[in-house]
Amino acid sequence: MNNYILVTGAAGFIGFYLCKKLLEKGFRVIGLDNLNDYYDITLKEKRLEILNEKFSKNSYDWKFIKSDLIEQDLLLKIFNDYEPKVVINLAAQAGVRYSLKNPSAYIKSNIVGFSNLLECCRLHDVKNLLYASSSSIYGGNTKIPFSETDPANHPVSLYAATKKSNELMAHVYSNLYNLPSIGMRFFTVYGPLGRPDMAPMIFARAILSGAPIKIFNNGNMSRSFTYIEDIIEIIFKLINNPALPDENFDRTNPNPSTSWNSHRIFNLGNEKPTNLIDFIETLEFEIGIKANKIYENMQPGDVQHTTSDCSLIKDWVGMVPKTSLKDGIRIFINWYKEFYNYQEKI
């Protein structure tokens, strides 16, 4: 607890909850975020406001720095000043569909930025690097559930390709510089203060306002909706369970999830997938309003079904996401109504 933990993307959805958890547990945290306007910046400001109010802007244990991973000199200064031994990278240009419109943003943040971070980790002898990957890297795979032991070499969006690249880059640094690293493949994380570009927020806003909601692929889609608190608990456990070499690694039949060096890949997702129509019905029940549905074709870059096999993470840390969709959506909708002041409109 004497060393700082560096959390990048600290004002983001997962980053905020993780910083809060770490600070509550007595860790010292450096939070870094560029506060870009990819989505409503008031949400990011609210998350920081909560952290600053609870842990004080002047607290010895909590420091927030507005910066970008592509600013290599400033990033190196942060490492020089605070010497973090655990680094959790949650900073990235997010969004599958946005990557079709602005691909350069993904190259800068997810490739160049991550490269800068790896270099800083190498130069400062970081003992545990955890970094966000994504279920989207499974891309064209149709074998369900998605397993880390399956090849994932056919991404269908640039966002997914950058996340796959991160896994390959981290593996190289683990091999060449003995940097223990774990790639966390997140599956559709939701909850209070969540991202407004994700389905729970988009659909809740539309239902409450009476606007139509677009249901792609005519509703023939499913997701492993995963509640935020479950994700945070697993990341917290990973801090004290860094990657180790796989002593049984067979180079003639390589396991994509492990390596002869200290690099691992884990799925972090709910093992019970939910059909999109069932998900919308759960929202309708909690809100008390029927959605105005418009059915459309599949969108470029989308994956039809995602289901998480969590056997590996269960073996590693002893838990898997367990919050039911019904419980998670109830908490989420209660927060949404209060945060956006919808009580009187219903």
Image (spheres, grey):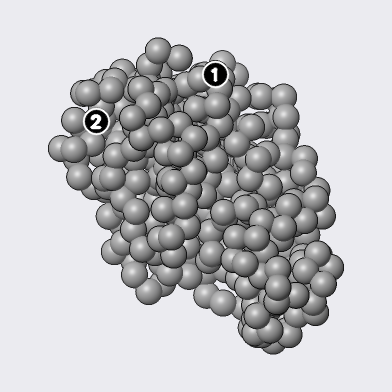
Q: What percent of the width, then of the height, locates residue 57?
A: 36, 35
Question: Residue 304 falls in which quadrant of the image?
Answer: bottom right
Residue 216's mark?
Answer: none
Q: Are marks 1 and 2 in contact (CB under 8 Å)?
A: no
Front-most of residues 265 and 23? 23
Q: Quadrant of the C terminus?
A: bottom right
Front-most of residues 171 and 47? 47
For residue 147, above or below residue 260 = below
Of circles 1 and 2, the one toward us is: 2
Front-most of residues 137 and 278? 278
Q: Which residue is mark 1?
A: 240
How packed mark 2 is, by other alpha carbons closer than 10 Å (few <14, some 14-19, many 20 or more), is some
Q: Which residue is mark 2?
A: 78
Residue 203 visible to the viewer? no
Q: What percent of the width, then of the height, locates residue 243?
A: 51, 23
Residue 27 visible to the viewer? yes
Q: Quadrant of the N terminus?
A: top left
Question: Residue 140 falls in which quadrant of the image?
Answer: bottom right
Front-most of residues 263 and 44? 44
